[in-house]
């Protein structure tokens, strides 16, 4: 082959004399070579490079025209024109490769681009469609020449299709990588027999890991199945595997599961894949697939599902509300009608009954003008309500309307405009008959006016307030009593500081607190400070207003005259009692002497009369003493000591002191229950007086031969003394007045005992003055038990 090339080259470059036979042989060889080269897709060529840098193509096959748009003879002496045919970016690499091949005498191999040929050029390529850009591969072997030049024998092939495929494949790979990167997608390859698997870095990055986080692929897959996959999703993945294996690849493996990323967050992953290798028994060997992070999609789906559920819930709720509204409109006791352009388009049963129609359906299509007295009244109503409706505001007023029968009634009318989607100038109206309400309200107002007149003309001061500060109203009498004007008193929380002293303010607050706790309170006496400074004694009664826990009313009565009369009565009683005590004592002493026989023996009748007189004198002295005690208690002149008292010893002494009186009534005094000691703080003498009153009462009202039992109980931190008799008991109607002065129950036994009716009243006041409590328990026919109790004190505290 080299010899042929040399001959051809010699024939082209050096004139040689040959005979006709050899010439014919050369022609046949050249024709054969030309035919052979035409049948090949590439171009044969010889390329020569001289020491001075020139280069040419001594030989090129006919394909040179197809590749470069040039004829072979155009390149035989100088091939520099080829530089204009080759892509400029590829020329440096091409020339460098030629130089290196020439220096090392190694095969020259290079890929480069041929620029697209221009239509209508001078190379005779008219009518030939050239590609936009062609890639070629040059491959040739160098041979050194005697003149120092280098001759390459080579072949040029068109690799445009291959390069385009490579470029398309590279672009596809780049696009795939971009898609995978944008979709946060990872690839995996699992050997189902060994359990070993491979995955790309994108899969790790998708989970926030790096290759350094795992020693090898096996450690990653161990982590994947032990910790990475959510426990609730493993079953679903295994079921998807079984389904895919069972289908023998006819259906893809696809499942959604949760996988933990490096930050510890659960991410939703879409896993898709298929088995790519099966053994002869149809068992899966190898599986390829992708993992895609679909967390955002799942969150969006969750939000959409929630929105859908909320929408369905709202729709159901709207339907329910519409149904409820329909039921409400139908069954509400207030008349409702929908009016469009002055015509009733809907009405409920209550409106039909109100307007005296047979039923609601009969009102549909009826003009609303029948409700008004005349057209002037109808227009007047419209002038008043239309501007409000146009502002989309609520209309509420009272109007005199008529029923279908012409009967007038007072109505409360409430309405509002509706959207104009179905009707023109549409509004919904509620009509309520308030004729009776109006009459009742008018009656209440008249009653209020009458009450206000009575309140202002009352001789008792009346004050209405709220809470513990503000006065809401006062009557004329209170204004007169206080000396202040109504305006000065009302709404001023400092009014109390002007009207009452601090102690009276405290007393009123305590009374108000008791009123809130118990619903009632006892009247209190205070001193009202007049505007000019003088004080007026007042009796104040408080009461809550009905159905209120904050508003109250106080009735204030001037008790100056009553106190003056009480003072006169007290002074009179005191004077009379003191004046009576001395002569009564003398009379009692004289009668006692007469009864004892000092003045001589008296007749039986005389003794009887003296005894009667003596007993009555003792009763009078007891009465005088009780009256004086009541006077001292009322005036605060009776003093009480606070000293240690042992109730056990005191009761024993009281029994001994009253034993003679009880024996005279044939009654025994028995102490049957008591602690070793019972120390309290009280006044011993006053407490003995209390015991004397209780024991004398018990003895008087007990049956002859019976016992009066005494007991001392320990009740928590208190001691209680009880005196129990076997008398007739106390009736219910008398129990509430038992401790009032000058009170005695009606005796029904034959041994009526005398008394002043002051003993129990004095006893109660004395016990309470010593900070104790007193009370009783009684049942008619079974006797009574009177008791008092005091706080206990230890002996060490008393010493």
Image (cartoon, rainbow, N blue to C red):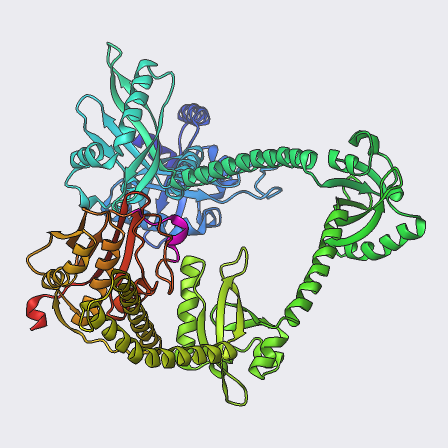
Q: Quadrant of the C terminus?
A: bottom left
Tell me which residue sits at (29%, 39%) in the image.
203
* Farthest residue, direction bottom: 532
At 82% from the left and 42% from the top, the residue drawn is 340
In terms of depth relative to the viewer, which is nearer, 615 or 579? 615
In the rendered view, tell whether residue 244 sits above or below residue 551: above
As drawn, is 798 to the left or to the right of 245? left
The reply to whether residue 229 is in sight is yes
Q: Residue furthest top?
A: 281
Work out whether residue 16 can be spotted: no
Relative depth, front residue between 110 and 368: 368
In the image, residue 779 lies at what x, y percent?
31, 45
**Residue 651 drawn at (x, y percent):** 13, 61
Task: Specify the quadrant of the image occupied by residue 162.
Answer: top left
Name the main secondary structure of what is drawn in magenta.
Answer: loop
Residue 499: give x, y in percent of width and height. 50, 81
In this figure, what is the number of numbered marks?
0
Query: In which quadrant will I find the N terminus?
Result: top left
**Whether residue 556 is situated above or below residue 229 in the rendered picture:** below
User: What is the magenta range?
Assistant: 728-737
- The residue furthest right is 375
Is residue 152 shown left or right of residue 527? left
In the visual, does 456 lie left or right of 343? left
Is-magenta flag for residue 735? Answer: yes
Q: Is residue 40 magenta?
A: no
Q: Above or below — where is 689 with respect to 380? A: below
């Amino acid at each position: 082959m080299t010899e042929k090339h040399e001959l051809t080259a010699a024939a082209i470059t050096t004139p040689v004399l040959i005979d006709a036979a050899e010439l014919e042989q050369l022609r046949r060889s050249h024709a054969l070579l030309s035919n052979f080269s035409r049948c090949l897709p590439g171009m044969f060529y010889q390329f020569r490079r001289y020491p001075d840098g020139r280069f040419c193509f001594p030989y090129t096959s006919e394909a040179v025209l197809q590749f470069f748009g040039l004829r072979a003879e155009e390149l035989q002496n100088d091939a520099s024109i080829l530089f204009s045919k080759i892509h400029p970016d590829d020329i440096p690499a091409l020339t460098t490769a030629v130089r290196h091949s020439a220096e090392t005498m190694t095969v020259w191999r290079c890929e480069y681009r041929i620029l697209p040929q221009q239509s209508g050029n001078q190379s005779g390529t008219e009518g030939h469609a050239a590609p936009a850009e062609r890639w070629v591969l040059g491959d040739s072997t160098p041979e050194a020449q005697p003149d120092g030049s280098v001759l390459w024998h080579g072949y040029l092939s068109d690799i445009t299709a291959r390069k385009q495929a490579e470029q398309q494949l590279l672009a596809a790979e780049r696009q795939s990588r971009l898609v995978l990167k944008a979709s946060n997608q990872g690839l995996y390859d699992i050997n189902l027999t060994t359990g070993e698997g491979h995955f790309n870095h994108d899969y790790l990055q998708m989970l926030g890991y790096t290759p350094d986080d795992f020693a090898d692929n096996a450690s990653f897959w161990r982590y994947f199945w032990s910790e990475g996959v959510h426990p609730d999703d493993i079953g679903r993945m295994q079921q998807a595997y079984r389904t895919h294996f069972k289908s023998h690849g006819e259906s893809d493996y696809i499942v959604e599961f949760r996988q933990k990323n490096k930050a510890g967050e659960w991410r939703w992953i879409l896993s898709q894949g298929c088995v790519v290798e099966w053994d002869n028994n149809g068992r899966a060997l190898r599986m390829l697939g992708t993992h895609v992070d679909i967390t955002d999609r799942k969150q969006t789906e969750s939000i959409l599902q929630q929105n859908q559920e909320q929408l369905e819930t709202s729709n159901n709720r709207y339907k329910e509300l519409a149904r409820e509204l329909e039921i409400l409109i139908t069954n509400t006791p207030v008349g409702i009608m929908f009016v469009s352009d002055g015509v009733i388009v809907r009405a409920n049963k209550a409106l039909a009954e109100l307007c005296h129609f047979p039923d609601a359906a009969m009102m549909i299509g009826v003009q609303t003008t029948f409700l008004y007295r005349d057209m002037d009244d109808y227009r007047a109503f419209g002038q008043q309500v239309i501007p409000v409706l146009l502002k989309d505001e609520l209309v509420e007023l009272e109007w005199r309307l008529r029923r279908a029968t012409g009967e007038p009634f007072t109505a409360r009318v409430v309405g509002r405009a509706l959207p104009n989607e179905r009707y023109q100038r549409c509004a919904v109206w509620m009509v309520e008959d308030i004729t009776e309400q109006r009459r009742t309200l008018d009656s209440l107002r008249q009653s209020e006016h009458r009450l206000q007149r009575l309140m202002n003309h009352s001789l008792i001061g009346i004050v209405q307030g709220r809470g513990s500060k503000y006065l809401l109203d006062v009557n004329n009498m209170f204004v007169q009593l206080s000396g202040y004007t109504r305006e000065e008193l009302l709404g001023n929380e400092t009014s109390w500081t002007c009207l009452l002293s601090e102690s009276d303010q405290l007393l009123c607050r305590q009374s108000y607190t008791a009123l809130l706790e118990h619903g009632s309170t006892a009247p209190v006496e205070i001193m009202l400070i007049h505007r000019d400074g003088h004080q007026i004694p007042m009796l104040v009664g408080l009461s809550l207003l009905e159905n209120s826990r904050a508003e109250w009313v106080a009735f204030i009565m001037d008790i100056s005259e009553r106190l003056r009369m009480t003072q006169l009565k007290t002074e009179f009683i005191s004077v009379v009692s003191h004046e009576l005590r001395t002569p009564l004592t003398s009379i009692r002493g004289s009668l006692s002497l007469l009864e004892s026989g000092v003045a001589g023996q008296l007749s039986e009748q005389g003794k009887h009369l003296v005894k009667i007189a003596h007993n009555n004198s003792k009763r009078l002295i007891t009465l005088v003493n009780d009256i004086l005690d009541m006077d001292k208690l009322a005036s605060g002149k009776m003093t009480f000591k606070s000293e240690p008292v042992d109730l056990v010893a005191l009761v024993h002494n009281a029994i001994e002191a009253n034993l003679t009186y009880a024996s005279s009534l044939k009654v025994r005094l028995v102490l049957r229950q008591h602690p070793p000691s019972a120390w309290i703080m009280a006044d011993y003498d006053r407490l003995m007086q209390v015991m004397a009153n209780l024991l004398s009462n018990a003895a008087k009202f007990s049956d002859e031969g019976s016992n009066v039992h005494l007991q001392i109980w320990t009740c928590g931190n208190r001691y209680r003394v009880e005196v129990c008799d076997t008398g007739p008991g106390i009736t219910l109607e008398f129990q509430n007045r038992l401790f009032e002065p000058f009170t005695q129950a009606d005796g029904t036994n034959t041994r009526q005992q005398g008394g002043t009716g002051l003993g129990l009243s004095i006893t109660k006041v004395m016990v309470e003055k010593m900070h104790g409590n007193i009370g009783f328990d009684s049942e008619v026919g079974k006797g009574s038990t009177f008791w008092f109790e005091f706080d206990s004190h230890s002996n060490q505290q008393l010493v």
